[in-house]
Image: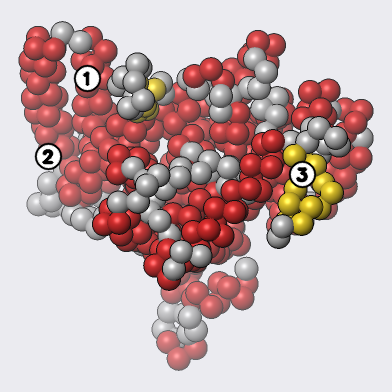
């Protein structure tokens, strides 16, 4: 029996994929088993042996079934532990296991594409130009920083930040290659929401034992902003699907996902996440024309002092203080406003931006290099400090391409699943742009991996909608070329 769906309908003389790939998979497994056995005898490290065994099995399985590799990736995004290379010194390095799996799965996908004769590195998408522009500016700025050898700049930190950013884009490229149709999009979303339920339940269980809820495997519960950003993604996408599904039982399921995620979201006490989710929901209500939801949000906000937990109210009110807070100074003048120390740090970081912009044209245009100062309080201040004016313009161009592409994704499709996904991801993109005002959202692994995964699914849905419209366009205008207009312009007019 053939193992591959693409074998259906092969012609006479063609070689089925299973006759090529299954022996290849078997050979790879035999070689890998021997390598693991030898390494285990030499190193005698059971954890390393297990990690290698899992990685090599995932690689082989990805070659046979690329969607299997994506399933593993989705599971590992929030549920993979960290590996600390040195717990005693300042040079300790934290590597999450999914960092390794991304590379393994990406290589498996490339081998699969080679078997199929599709050797292009990435799927065509308007977002690709934005990625190349921004990442190219980051590389150029970092190379200049390497030449300058500035203080407060570390080659090691820059290398790992650039590698981390590359991993995000690899997630986008490999998922857009591996997922091809509506069924696969649906299956990946099912697993995505199952993982989100596990994370949410974990957060609910930790509410009584921690001050601020964080994601699994975050040591000491120190990353509530990370969980807040992730649950913002989950809530926006689930709400987008909720507004579009015609089936009552699916509305109940998506409503349950939202309800379960909202409880730990509140107890992250992340004010940046609160504002981001609120803006994301407002955008989603407008896109889906569910204006009754806007009214419901208004009522909830008006009654927040009655329905919100006391800890949440205290956290929000803690932002503005009188008598015991930090004075907000703008352009050398006191504003009379006092805020807590955390908020004040987010304001003061812009003084560094003014400083770096005043050092000269080179720094004004390309900044001081990726990871300079390692700012964690503002995504946009960090981008300007690291890559200057060209960097923030390239980043803005990438965000524009993302928003435009995702918007086309939900406007061009006539399928409720893809339309709901597109709306949810569009709202998520807006929410993360807002979230970045208070933290480095676009550099946080547990936010960016799910985000680029969802973007890839939306791009696949967009391309499928375009192909479907093109096929319909050709059928309708077959034999009438003089009456044919551009299918893209026709689609835009009817969207």
Q: Secondary structure at mark 3?
A: strand
Q: On the picture, is 409 further left or further right than 170?
A: right
Q: Earlier in the sequence, mark 1 or mark 2?
A: 2
Q: Using the image, tell me which numbered label, if any, was put on residue 87.
A: none
Compared with 10, 450 (above or below) is above
Name the N-terminal-most of marks 1 and 3. 1
Q: Is residue 58 visible?
A: yes
In this rendering, position of residue 107 left or right of residue 270:
left
Compared to residue 463, the image places residue 5 above or below, namely above
For the view shown, which residue lies furthest in the bottom direction? Answer: 482
Q: Which residue is mark 1?
A: 53
Q: Is residue 330 or residue 234 the one in the foreground?
A: 330
Q: Quadrant of the C terminus?
A: bottom right
Residue 226 % position (x, y): 56, 33
Tell me which residue sits at (23%, 46%) in the image: 110
| Distance between mark 3 and mark 2 Cα atoms | 69 Å
In x, y percent, where is residue 136? 34, 61
Residue lying furthest front: 332
The residue at the point 53 percent across, 41 percent down is: 376
Side (left or right) of 210 relative to 181: right
Residue at mark 3: 327
- Mark 2 lies on residue: 20
Q: Earlier in the sequence, mark 3 or mark 2?
A: 2
User: SS at mark 2?
Assistant: helix
CA gap between label 1 and label 3 equals: 56 Å
> Could you say where residue 313 lies in the image, as x and y percent from the top left?
83, 29
SS class, disc 1:
helix
Q: Quadrant of residue 323?
A: top right
Residue under the point 38% across and 54% down: 369
Quarter of the image for residue 412 reads bottom right
């Amino acid at each position: 029996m053939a193992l591959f769906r693409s074998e259906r309908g092969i012609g006479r003389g063609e070689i089925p994929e299973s006759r090529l790939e299954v022996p290849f998979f078997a050979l790879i497994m035999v070689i890998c088993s021997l390598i693991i056995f030898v390494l285990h005898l030499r190193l005698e490290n059971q954890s390393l042996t297990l990690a290698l065994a899992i990685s090599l099995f995932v690689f082989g399985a990805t070659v046979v079934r690329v969607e299997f590799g994506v399933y593993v990736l989705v599971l590992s995004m929030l549920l993979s532990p960290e590996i600390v290379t040195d717990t005693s010194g300042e040079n300790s390095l934290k590597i999450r296991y999914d960092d390794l799996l991304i590379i393994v799965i990406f290589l498996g996908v490339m081998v699969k594409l080679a078997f199929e004769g599709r050797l292009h590195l990435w799927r065509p998408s308007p977002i690709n130009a934005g990625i190349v522009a921004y990442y190219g500016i980051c590389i150029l700025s970092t190379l200049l920083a390497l030449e300058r050898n500035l203080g407060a700049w570390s080659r090691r930190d820059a290398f790992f930040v650039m590698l981390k950013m590359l991993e995000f884009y690899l997630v986008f490229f490999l998922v857009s290659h591996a997922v091809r149709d509506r069924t696969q999009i649906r299956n990946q979303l099912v697993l995505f929401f199952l993982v989100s339920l596990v994370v949410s339940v974990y957060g609910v269980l930790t509410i009584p034992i921690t001050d601020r809820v964080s994601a699994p495997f975050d040591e000491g519960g120190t990353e509530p902003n990370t969980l807040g950003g992730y649950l913002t993604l989950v809530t926006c996408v689930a709400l987008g699907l909720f507004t579009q599904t015609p089936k009552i039982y699916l509305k109940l399921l998506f409503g349950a996902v939202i309800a379960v995620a909202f409880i730990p979201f509140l107890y992250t006490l992340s004010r940046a996440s609160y504002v981001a989710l609120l803006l994301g929901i407002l955008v989603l209500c407008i896109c889906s024309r569910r204006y009754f939801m806007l009214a419901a949000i208004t009522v909830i906000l008006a009654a927040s002092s009655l329905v919100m937990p006391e800890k949440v109210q205290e956290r929000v009110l803690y932002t503005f203080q009188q008598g015991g807070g930090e004075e907000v100074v703008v352009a050398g003048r006191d504003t009379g406003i006092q805020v807590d120390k955390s908020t004040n740090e987010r304001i003061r970081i812009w003084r560094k931006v003014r400083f770096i912009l005043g050092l000269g044209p080179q720094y004004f245009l390309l900044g001081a290099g990726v990871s300079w100062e390692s700012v964690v309080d503002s995504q946009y201040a960090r981008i300007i400090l690291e890559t200057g004016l060209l960097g923030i313009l390239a980043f803005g161009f990438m965000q524009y391409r993302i928003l435009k592409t995702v918007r086309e994704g939900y406007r061009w499709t006539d399928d409720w699943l893809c339309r709901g996904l597109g709306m949810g991801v569009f709202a998520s993109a807006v929410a993360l742009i807002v979230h970045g005002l208070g933290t480095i959202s676009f550099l946080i692994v547990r936010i960016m991996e799910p985000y680029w995964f969802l973007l890839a699914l939306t791009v696949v849905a967009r391309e499928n909608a375009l192909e479907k419209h093109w096929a319909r366009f050709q059928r309708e205008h077959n034999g009438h070329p003089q009456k044919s207009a551009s299918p893209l312009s026709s689609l835009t007019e009817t969207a």
